[in-house]
Image (spheres, grey):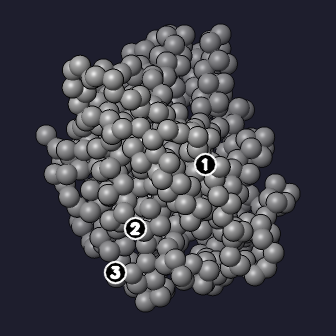
């Protein structure tokens, strides 16, 4: 393997370093050339991609180099984590944040939490355990989701597996471990009842825009992002903080790591100091924060002609078929904005207005499905997804979301069918083509994600 010092002296090394920092945000490596070079040299030896210029050429290719970039990121990121890490913050969650959010959401009976930079999963699972043990009776029948994301695919795979060594429990009381985990050999596996409400997905805080309805990262009650941005530059964090704020509902809470208390960055939040923790709350409306949102301003009526139903398979020839009119994009953009702000009722009303103007527009039904899902309307979500597919069988994203939906309901065959439909629809599209309505997700990325889902489900 090449000596790190040799790699550092390579004229292409500075460009490689910039690419890594630009992709991951990890400015931490800006003054750690030797550490970065050691990791990159190991990857170069493993893959045979040499010299530095060749390796750089590969990882810079967003399509062909994606797997190698993922493999490199898996080595570069630091996944130190354990259950109930930093007790003071979990105390604050239990005593201040959760009671506040549960009271505010008691009528909608819904709770949405995002663990950003979840590593191998102890953080989101600790939240799930706390919710069930301390608030179980209060949230029985609620629609609870904990969305856990990370840039490191290897960590995500381990998180989904949910098995941990003794060391991950160094801050967990024994009775909690015995109650919530099952011993499997030398490891402990989280029990399904604490696992169900947690879903893991890839998300790069630097490259994937948020809030994003499509990524299910919008309208959150709580965001917990601890020990992640400490590796980023101040400018990067300055850019992220307003995005976190926008991703919260009015009254929602942000919990950052206790080592990153630069309160100046969070000046747009209301700050709450508790023993050993600083909490940030988004407060838009004057107190009480449970006050109803401002009344829904009706969307401008889209100026659309009502088209005749499009045929599912275009019969040949189509005599004088009226053109299928695309919906007013401003209307759907507005729906997305509302949904990204977690203003679900208004977003739903927006979808309904668009559907009233053009019942045959598959995109309006698709967005309606996503909004209904956030509202916990399972049946409505499924109906709208199927309607979107019925109206446009070539629209990929509803197939994908239907797959996720059926998978969550343990309809394995249905989920496999939907995911295979996605792969079939993507077959002839170029890898780097960005999908309509996919928040810049490319064909290649969706293909990879669906492939991973099929592997996990156990498809042949
Ligand atoms: C030290 S761990 C923190 C785990 C957990 N939040 C905790 O405090 O116990 C940092 C995590 O941030 C993730 N990470 C680093 N850069 C990221 C990025 N650009 N987008 C998303 N996650 C990132 C790493 O992969 C790693 O899993």
- Answer yes or no: disc 1 within 8 Å of ligand 1: no
Q: Position of residue 142 (x, y in %)?
A: 43, 78
Marks 1 and 2, the one that precedes in the sequence: 1
Mark seen at residue 377: 2
Tell me which residue sits at (54%, 28%) in the image: 38
The quadrant holding residue 20 is top right
Q: Residue furthest front?
A: 320
The quadrant holding residue 399 is top left
Q: Say whether residue 328 is left or right of residue 232.
A: left
Residue underneath mark 1? 301
* Residues packed near mark 3 inside 10 Å, few (<14), some (14 to 19) or many (20 plus): few
Tell me which residue sits at (81%, 75%) in the image: 286
The answer to whether the residues at label 3 and label 1 have Cβ atoms under 8 Å apart is no
Q: Nearer the viewer, residue 216 or 20?
A: 216
Mark seen at residue 178: 3
Q: Nearer the viewer, residue 421 or 245?
A: 421
Marks 3 and 1, the one that precedes in the sequence: 3
Tell me which residue sits at (69%, 36%) in the image: 27
The answer to whether the residues at label 3 and label 2 have Cβ atoms under 8 Å apart is no
The answer to whether the residues at label 1 and label 2 have Cβ atoms under 8 Å apart is no
Q: Could you give the CA–CA distance between mark 3 and mark 1, rounded to whole angstroms?
A: 58 Å
Above or below, comparing residue 289 to residue 210 in the picture: below
Marks 3 and 2, the one that precedes in the sequence: 3
Q: Position of residue 343 (x, y in %)?
A: 61, 62
Q: Nearer the viewer, residue 201 or 159?
A: 201
């Amino acid at each position: 393997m090449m000596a790190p010092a040799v790699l550092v002296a390579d004229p292409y090394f500075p460009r490689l370093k910039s690419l890594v920092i630009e992709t991951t945000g990890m400015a931490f490596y800006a003054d750690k050339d030797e550490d970065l070079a050691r990791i990159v040299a190991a990857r170069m030896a493993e893959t045979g991609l040499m010299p530095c210029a060749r390796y750089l050429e590969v990882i810079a290719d967003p399509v062909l180099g994606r797997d190698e970039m993922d493999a490199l990121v898996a080595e570069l990121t630091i996944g130190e984590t354990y259950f109930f890490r930093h007790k003071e913050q979990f105390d604050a969650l239990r005593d201040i944040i959760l009671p506040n959010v549960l009271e505010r959401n008691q009528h909608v009976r819904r709770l949405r939490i995002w663990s950003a930079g979840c590593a191998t999963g102890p953080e989101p699972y600790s939240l799930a355990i706390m919710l069930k043990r301390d608030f179980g009776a209060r949230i029985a029948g609620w629609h609870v989701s904990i969305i856990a994301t990370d840039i490191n695919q290897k960590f995500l795979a381990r998180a989904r597996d949910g098995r941990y060594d003794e060391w991950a429990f160094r801050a967990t009381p024994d009775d909690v471990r015995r109650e919530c985990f099952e011993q499997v050999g030398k490891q402990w596996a989280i029990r399904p009842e604490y696992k169900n409400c947690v879903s893991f997905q890839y998300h790069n805080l630097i490259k994937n825009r948020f809030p994003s309805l499509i990524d299910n990262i919008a309208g959150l009650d709580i965001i917990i992002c601890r020990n992640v941005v400490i590796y980023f530059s101040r400018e990067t964090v300055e850019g992220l903080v307003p995005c976190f704020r926008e991703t919260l509902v009015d009254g929602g809470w942000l919990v950052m790591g206790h080592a990153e208390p630069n309160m100046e960055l969070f000046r747009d939040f209301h700050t709450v100091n508790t023993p050993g923790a600083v909490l940030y709350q988004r407060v838009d409306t004057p107190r009480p924060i449970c006050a109803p949102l401002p009344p829904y301003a009706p969307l401008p009526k889209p100026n659309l002609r009502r088209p005749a139903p499009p045929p599912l398979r275009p019969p040949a020839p189509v005599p004088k078929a009226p053109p299928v009119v695309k919906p007013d994009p401003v209307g759907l953009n507005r729906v997305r904005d509302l949904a990204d702000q977690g203003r679900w009722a208004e977003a739903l009303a927006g979808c309904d207005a668009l559907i009233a103007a053009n019942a045959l527009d598959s995109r309006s039904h698709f967005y309606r499905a996503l909004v209904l899902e956030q509202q916990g309307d399972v049946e409505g979500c499924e109906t709208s997804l199927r309607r979107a597919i019925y109206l446009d069988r070539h629209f990929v994203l509803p197939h994908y979301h239907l797959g996720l939906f059926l998978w969550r309901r343990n309809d394995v065959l249905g989920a496999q069918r939907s995911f295979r439909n996605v792969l079939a629809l993507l077959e002839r599209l170029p890898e780097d083509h960005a999908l309509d309505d996919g928040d810049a997700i490319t064909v290649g990325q969706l293909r990879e994600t669906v492939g991973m889902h099929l592997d996990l489900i156990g498809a042949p």
